[in-house]
Image (cartoon, helix red, strand yellow):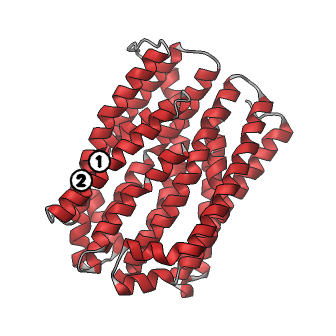
Amino acid sequence: MILSNISVPLLGLVDTAVIGHMSSAHYLAGIALGASSISVLFWLASFLRMSTTGVIAQAFGSRESAKLTLLLQNSLILAVVFASLIIALQPLFLAAIEYFSGAKAQVIEQAHLYFSIRIYSAPAAICNLVLLGFMLGMHYGKGPFYLVLLTNVVNILLDILFVVGFEWGVAGAAWASLIADYCALMFALLLIKRLFSANKIVWQWHIPSRLEIAKLLTLNRDIFLRSLLLQLCFSFMTFYGARLGELTLAANAVLLNFLMLVSFALDGIAYAAEAKVGHAKGEQDKSKVQLWVKLSVFWGAAFAILYSVIFAAFGYEIIELLTDIPEVITHAQSYLPWLVALPIVAMGCFLFDGVFVGLTRAKEMRNSMFFAATIGFFLPLLLTTAWHNHGLWFAMSCFMALRGVSLYYRYRQLCHQGTLLQ
């Protein structure tokens, strides 16, 4: 899971590196605005991946094989509905990008170009999240690795072909990602078929009851609200950066790749925690839940420290690999200390997200995110507006730290109250 998640940021890294070596910063700023807007929408759908992993892991742990196809079917139906809604609302999203970013006309033009192509990969990208969640819940760790590896290889090759070879610019990067998403969907379906065969699961169409739909919607509602708040904070990074100027927007686009690299690496451990904790809850084994939490924290801390050391030692060189625009390099390097500290600061929020997904305690995740977003992000940002972009990165650091602290506090409460497995 760590290997597969580390490879995910290569999509953003290659997009940024290829576009970052074009003639002007407005190309890089445009793809940053368009790609982050797409990411907000697609990662809003991560609630489907999380809920699927949790319920599948618990059904797998309690050996309720009959529920597996029902749960997968219901999640896929929700994925298609959500993707269709995103595509239908495309004009509204394009207007919002222009209004909230306040970016220059050249930047908006490139952002709209990227967004209007990439949006049509929504059905594939969101169904892939559900299928990924199913594989995680079934402890099929190799499946997500193969899936993400294929997606990244296809995207990287097409990025180079379309942007460098055909000189399609930002449109080429968008087409590369779209094609990669649909290739991944076809491959994911083959992996699911193989997984069914290995576990002697027979696909059956079900007509879900009103109670089943209500339970799934309640779980998804709370995780959706949690994801919405998370993406609100991350998208605010981009839109607020756009208002600080094209140069700041481009610099943050480079620096956010550091954060994505950290998040996906730590999420690799968190995904494993989701599956293991969910399986242990299905078995109603409290000691196993606590064991997996301790192991996840140990390995999370080790990787967080490793990332901080790498960023401190090679941060300048990484920035120069991503762009050769001198003013963007200089601007990005001045904010590098925030990225050096962030892996350690953010470790807890990633790991305990995984723990609470496995426990299917979505309400706690929602409440923690609301607390961290209001008290940990927007309040510090309001108090440090004079710091400009430094204030923005300070607010992001506070946000990450408070998410981890609040979830850990709630976990300790559940342990002491004896309600961890409820």
Secondary element at tag 1: helix
50 horizontally vs 285: left or right? left
In the depicted structure, whether residue 5 falls above or below residue 22: above
Nearer to us in this view, 308 or 111: 308
Nearer to us in this view, 373 or 289: 289
Label disc, if present, on residue 68 of the rendered structure: none
Residue 145 x %, y %: 46, 40
In the depicted structure, whether residue 244 falls above or below residue 66: below
Residue type at mark 1?
Val
Label disc, if present, on residue 154 of the rendered structure: 1
The residue lying at 24 percent from left, 59 percent from top is 160
* Residue occupied by mark 2: 158
Residue 251 visible somewhere in the drawing:
yes
Residue 284 x %, y %: 74, 24
Q: Spot the residue most to the right.
A: 416
The residue lying at 62 percent from left, 26 percent from top is 58
The residue lying at 33 percent from left, 39 percent from top is 184
Residue 319 x %, y %: 44, 75
Q: CA distance from mark 1 to mark 2?
A: 6 Å
Residue type at mark 2?
Leu
Indicate the quadrant containing the N terminus: top left, top right, bottom left or bottom right. Answer: top right
Q: Spot the residue most to the left.
A: 166
Marks 1,2: beta carbons within 8 A: yes
Secondary element at tag 2: helix
